[in-house]
C-alpha cells in the first residue's frame, strides 16, 4: 500500500512536534518543517524514542519568507501526492493596543495568516490534481473568543477562522477538506505572550495586566496536556469520513462557546471583567 504523506509546519516544539510524531505513529511519512533546522534535535530524538525516526524528515521553512516558501514549493515537485497539511506554525504577541505598534500587528499577521495562506497555496496544485487532501489549521479558542492583552493574536486567529470557512467552500468540489482545531489553554502555549509583557509601573494598564496574570497563573495547573491536540489531529488526518469544520478542544472550551452563543454580550462582558478584576 502506498504510504501517505503529511506536512506539518512549526515542529520544533509544542503542538507541532507532537503532531509530527503522532502522524508518523499513524503511518504517515511526515515532512516536519521549522524555521531553524538547528532546533530539530528534540524532534528527532522524540521520533527515535517512538521508533518512527525513519518517517520524520526535518525541512527548513520560514513561513514569513517568500524565498523560503518558494524553495519549499519547489521541493514538493517530487511528491505525487500530499495527503495532509497541518498548519501549526505561529506565535502569540501580547500587549495592550495603545502600547503596541502597528508593526507588532503586521508581524503577527505575517506569520499566523499570510504565511499560512502561502503554504496552502504551495500544496494546493498537488492536492487539486489528485482531487483529495486534508488541510488542518491549528486555530485557537482565541479565534472565537477575545481576551484582553492578546488583541494581535486574537485578531489573527479570527482572520484564520473566516479564511478557513471560505477555503472549505472553495475546495470542497475538489475533494479537499479544510478543518479548524480550536485548542483552549494547554501547557505549551499562548500565555507566554502575556508573561513577556513588561510590567511597567508607569503604564496605565499596569494594574489590569497584574490582575490578568494573577488569574492566569492561578489556573495554570488546569491547563491541558498538548498531546490531546496532537492525537486529535492524527485521528482527523487518518479518518475516511468527512470531518467537521471546527473541533474545539480543551477544558471548558465547549461550554464557554455555548455560553457566548446564548448570553448577551453585556452580561458576558460583566462576568469576564468581574473575574479578571475581582
Image (cartoon, grey):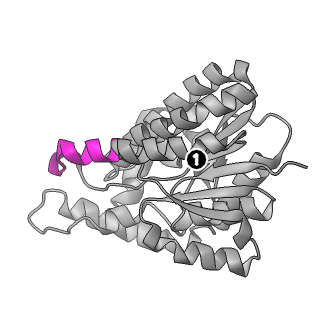
Instruction: Name the residue carrying label 1.
Output: 256
Quadrant of the drawing holding the C terminus: bottom left
Q: Is residue 147 visible?
A: yes
Q: Position of residue 260 (x, y in %)?
A: 54, 38
Q: Position of residue 235 (x, y in %)?
A: 78, 52
The residue under the point 24% across, 51% down is 96
Mark 1 lies on a secondary structure that is: helix
Q: Position of residue 98 (x, y in %)?
A: 16, 46
Relative vertical location of residue 30 with respect to residue 50 in this rendering, above or below: above
Relative vertical location of residue 47 with respect to residue 276 in this rendering, above or below: below
The residue under the point 52% across, 32% down is 121
The residue under the point 72% across, 49% down is 5
In this picture, which residue range is highlighted in magenta?
A: 97-109
Q: Is residue 266 left or right of residue 23?
A: left
The residue under the point 19% across, 42% down is 102
Neighbor class of circle 1 (other Cα within 10 Å; few <14, some 14-19, many 20+) is: few
Residue extending farthest to the front is: 78
Amino acid at each position: 500500500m502506498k504510504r501517505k504523506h503529511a506536512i506539518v509546519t512549526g515542529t520544533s516544539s509544542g503542538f507541532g512536534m507532537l503532531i509530527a510524531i503522532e502522524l508518523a505513529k499513524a503511518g504517515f511519512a511526515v515532512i516536519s518543517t521549522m524555521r531553524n533546522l538547528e532546533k530539530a534535535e528534540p524532534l528527532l530524538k522524540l521520533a527515535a524514542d517512538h521508533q518512527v525516526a525513519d518517517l520524520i524528515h526535518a525541512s527548513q521553512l520560514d513561513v514569513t519568507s517568500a524565498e523560503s516558501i518558494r524553495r519549499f514549493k519547489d521541493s514538493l515537485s517530487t511528491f505525487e501526492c500530499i495527503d495532509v497539511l497541518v498548519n501549526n506554525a505561529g506565535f502569540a504577541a501580547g500587549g495592550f493596543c495603545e502600547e503596541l505598534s502597528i508593526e507588532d500587528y503586521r508581524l503577527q499577521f505575517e506569520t499566523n495568516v499570510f504565511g499560512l495562506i502561502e503554504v496552502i497555496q504551495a500544496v494546493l496544485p498537488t492536492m487539486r490534481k489528485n482531487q483529495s487532501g486534508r488541510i488542518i489549521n491549528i486555530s485557537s479558542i482565541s479565534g472565537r473568543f477575545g481576551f484582553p492583552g492578546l488583541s494581535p493574536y486574537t485578531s489573527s486567529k479570527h482572520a484564520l477562522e473566516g479564511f478557513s470557512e471560505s477555503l472549505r467552500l472553495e475546495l470542497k468540489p475538489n475533494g479537499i477538506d479544510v478543518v479548524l482545531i480550536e485548542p483552549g489553554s494547554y501547557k505549551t502555549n499562548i500565555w507566554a505572550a502575556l508573561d513577556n509583557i513588561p510590567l511597567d509601573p508607569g503604564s496605565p494598564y499596569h494594574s489590569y495586566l497584574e490582575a490578568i496574570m494573577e488569574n492566569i497563573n492561578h489556573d495554570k495547573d488546569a491547563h491541558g496536556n498538548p498531546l490531546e491536540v496532537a492525537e486529535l489531529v492524527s485521528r482527523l488526518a487518518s479518518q475516511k469520513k468527512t470531518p467537521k469544520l471546527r473541533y474545539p478542544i480543551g477544558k471548558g472550551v465547549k461550554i464557554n462557546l455555548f455560553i457566548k452563543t446564548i448570553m448577551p454580550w453585556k452580561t458576558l462582558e460583566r462576568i469576564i471583567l468581574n473575574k479578571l478584576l475581582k
